[in-house]
Image: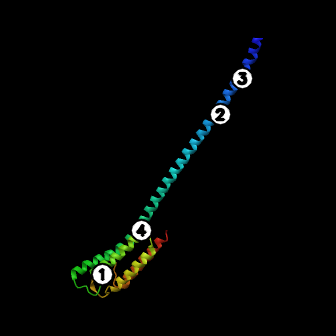
């Protein structure tokens, strides 16, 4: 009788043991699988955030470089030729020392400071069109104060023979600058 019970109970106990072990293993495997999925999701999220930050900073750097390039072009095409004229006028003024009908050195410095402030505004990207118009009004003031009959005007390399030519140059530069501003 004992042998009979042992023959029946042993397989039942073995079956329950295997079933409990399997169910426990399945539960552990599901937990590990879910944990692994969470880890993969977290890594993916972190890598995407890192990629977005890198793209953002790359984009920001590209934008800064693009703006810097545009501003350098503006300064090269608009301000530097005018500054060159003023520098040349200063040299002529030092030679003749009697340039009373046109701009004197102090006026040139004052106008240059205004233009330089406008250039800085443009570099900072604020009120660019307004800054160009302010520069234009100062430059128109400057050309009105140039004496067209003065022999010192001959130093203009571009071949100006009157202040009207100078004004046309200024206006063309302002128009070019506004076209550049349309890029924004």
23 lies left or right of 150: right
The secondary structure type at the circle numbered 3 is: helix
Which of marks 3 and 2 precedes in the sequence? 3
Give the quarter of the image for residue 134: bottom left
Label 1 environment density (alpha carbons within 10 Å; few <14, some 14–19, many ≥20):
some
Residue drawn at x 70%, y 27% is 19
184 lies left or right of 9: left
Label 2 environment density (alpha carbons within 10 Å; few <14, some 14–19, many ≥20):
few
Residue drawn at x 26%, y 86% is 100
Identify the residue position indicated by label 3 in the image: 15
Identify the residue position indicated by label 1 in the image: 107
Which of marks 4 and 2 precedes in the sequence? 2
- Report, in whole angstroms, how far the alpha carbon at label 4 lies from the one at label 1: 26 Å
Question: Does the image show residue 78?
Answer: no
- Report, in whole angstroms, how far the alpha carbon at label 3 lies from the one at label 4: 80 Å
50 lies left or right of 14: left
Identify the residue position indicated by label 4 in the image: 124
The secondary structure type at the circle numbered 4 is: helix
Q: Which mark is residue 27?
A: 2
Position of residue 23 relative to residue 120, above or below, is above
Residue 182 position, x and y percent, is: 49, 71
Which of marks 4 and 3 precedes in the sequence? 3
Which of marks 1 and 3 precedes in the sequence? 3
Tag in front: 3 or 4: 3
Tag in front: 2 or 4: 2
The secondary structure type at the circle numbered 2 is: helix
- Report, in whole angstroms, how far the alpha carbon at label 2 lies from the one at label 3: 18 Å
The answer to whether the residue labelled 2 contacts the one labelled 3, judged by CB atoms less than 8 Å apart, is no
Give the quarter of the image for residue 94: bottom left
Residue 89 position, x and y percent, is: 28, 79
Label 3 environment density (alpha carbons within 10 Å; few <14, some 14–19, many ≥20):
few
Tag in front: 1 or 2: 2
């Amino acid at each position: 009788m004992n042998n009979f019970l042992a023959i029946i109970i042993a397989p039942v106990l073995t079956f329950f043991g295997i079933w409990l072990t399997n169910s426990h293993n399945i539960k552990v495997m599901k937990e590990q699988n879910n944990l692994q999925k969470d880890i993969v999701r977290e890594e993916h999220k972190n890598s995407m955030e890192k990629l977005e930050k890198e793209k953002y900073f790359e984009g920001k750097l590209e934008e800064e470089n693009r703006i810097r390039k545009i501003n350098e072009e503006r300064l090269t095409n608009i301000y530097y030729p005018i500054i060159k004229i003023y520098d040349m006028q200063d040299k002529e003024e030092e030679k003749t020392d009697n340039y009373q009908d046109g701009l004197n050195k102090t006026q040139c410095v004052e106008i240059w400071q205004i233009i330089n402030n406008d250039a800085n505004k443009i570099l900072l990207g604020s009120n660019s069109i307004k800054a160009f118009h302010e520069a234009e009004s100062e430059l128109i003031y400057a050309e009105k104060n140039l004496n067209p009959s003065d022999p010192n005007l001959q130093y203009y390399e571009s071949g100006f023979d009157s202040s009207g030519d100078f004004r046309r140059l200024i206006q063309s530069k302002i128009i070019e600058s506004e076209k550049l501003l349309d890029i924004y």
